[in-house]
Amino acid sequence: MKVVIMAGGKGTRISSVASDIPKPMIKIEDKPVLEHEIECLRSQGFTDLIITVSHLGNIIIDYFGDGSKFGVNIEYYNEVEPLGNAGALFRLKDKLTEDFLLINADAIFDIDFNRLVNYHKEKGGLVTLFTHPNSHPYDSGLIIADKDNKVLKWLAKEDERPEYYKNRVNAGIHVISPMVLDVEISTPKIDLDRQLLKPLANTGKMYVYDSPEYVKDMGTPDRYYSVCEDFENGIVQKRNLRNKQKAIFLDRDGTINKYVGFLTDINQFELIDGVSEAIKKINHSEYLCIVITNQPVIARGEVSVEELDEIHNKMQTLLGKDGAYIDGLYYCPHHPDKGFVGERLEYKIECECRKPKPGLILQAAKDFNIDLNQSWMIGDGKNDVLCGINAGCKTALIGNGFDADINDKSLLKIINRIL
Ligand SMILES: [Zn+2]
């Protein structure tokens, strides 16, 4: 599969770090970002590259040449007149005869590309967007998708957004069919997001690929320095899903949000003080942060699946405002006891996912390639600890009353001890 790397951006906001070189040539541990990207691609068998360059592009061409020194083939497309970030794709149409990977060069990443491409083929869409939660969803474009991961809405930064939303941001890595280029666009410059991709929302032809792997842009000096730190600590590489992951599983009610018994009204959902700070620390560590919760309110007929989704959107929105995010969420909608008014019989079963059974954690382990022995389950109840033990995790309990590997007063205190 061909890879088109868009390396033409100017990167003015990061000019205090390096102003005389193009952004993809900024170094992380003595190597340009673009070289790290090329190594990541080559190691997974992607060696057929086209790099689009503009601003100071000669520096990139001088460094990488035809790619042979780096084990890949590189062709360049030099944008003499500004075409917008998608303009070059139309000029390259003859070379793009099959689905291709399209990558922004101003991010550092380490992802399992074959997993992404296989998913794209399985879904059969025209476009698959690599999406992930980030630490600043409030000023990022958002993607809203349905249960089948089809994109319903593409909300650019400037678009009005719902009050509560899932923290799902386009990471600038895509698999694209050349059929996307079969459109007439008459503007002299063509914007990839707004003119090519956004119009595919709600057509059933574009999918999201949610992943917790490491993709971060270096748009500001602060973000650049934090990426360098993550690289040094090995976090960038470890997050590649080809590698076994470590996770911290969190219970929801009483652990993340204030305990109110069965939570049935979205207005009852409030974060516990210190939780955002604790989750932010997990986000900066090598652990994934995954929520594991029993929600028998579904079986009891007190909350619909849509209402529960909205409660979880509120959780993600509140965490996002504080710069924190979760990598995954699994809930059990079931309850075994029948015979109540208003119950939904289809959920009244003896299932394998209701804590203390380990079903939800086992499913997460499968989805994210998690090593459970290296992972933690944290909650405020005995069932959380038992669930962790049943799944083979280390355990921590907020409060006393049952012995876990760690007992402490708050999530933040526990996280400080684990990390
Ligand atoms: Zn269940």
Image: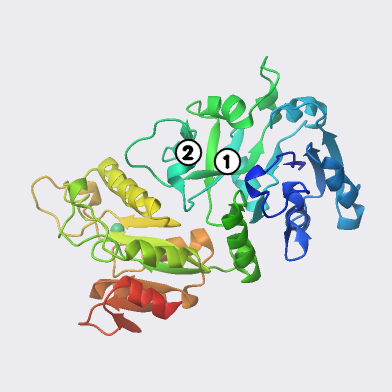
The reply to whether residue 389 is in sight is no
Find residue 253 and report its image quarter. bottom left
> 13 above or below 98?
below
Give the tally of numbered discs.
Answer: 2
The residue under the point 82% across, 31% down is 95
Instruction: Answer with left or right where residue 265 lies relative to residue 367.
Output: left
**Element class at badge 1:** strand
Specify how the rendered protein is coloured: rainbow
User: Residue extending furthest front?
Assistant: 16
Residue type indicated by callout 1: Leu
Dot label at residue 143: 2
> 2 above or below 80?
below
**Residue 228 image position (x, y, % from top left):** 64, 63
Instruction: Answer with left or right where residue 258 lies relative to residue 360.
Output: left
**Residue 355 image position (x, y, % from top left):** 29, 67
User: Residue extending furthest left?
Assistant: 341
The residue under the point 72% across, 48% down is 23
Dot label at residue 129: 1
Find residue 415 and report its image quarter. bottom left
The answer to whether the residue labelled 1 contacts the one labelled 2, judged by CB atoms less than 8 Å apart, is: yes
> 415 above or below 99?
below
Mark 1 surroundings: few (<14), some (14-19) or many (≥20) residues within 10 A: many
Q: Nearer the viewer, mark 1 or mark 2?
A: 2
**Residue 227 image position (x, y, % from top left):** 61, 60
Q: Quadrant of ligand 1?
A: bottom left
**Element class at badge 2:** strand
The residue under the point 87% across, 52% down is 63
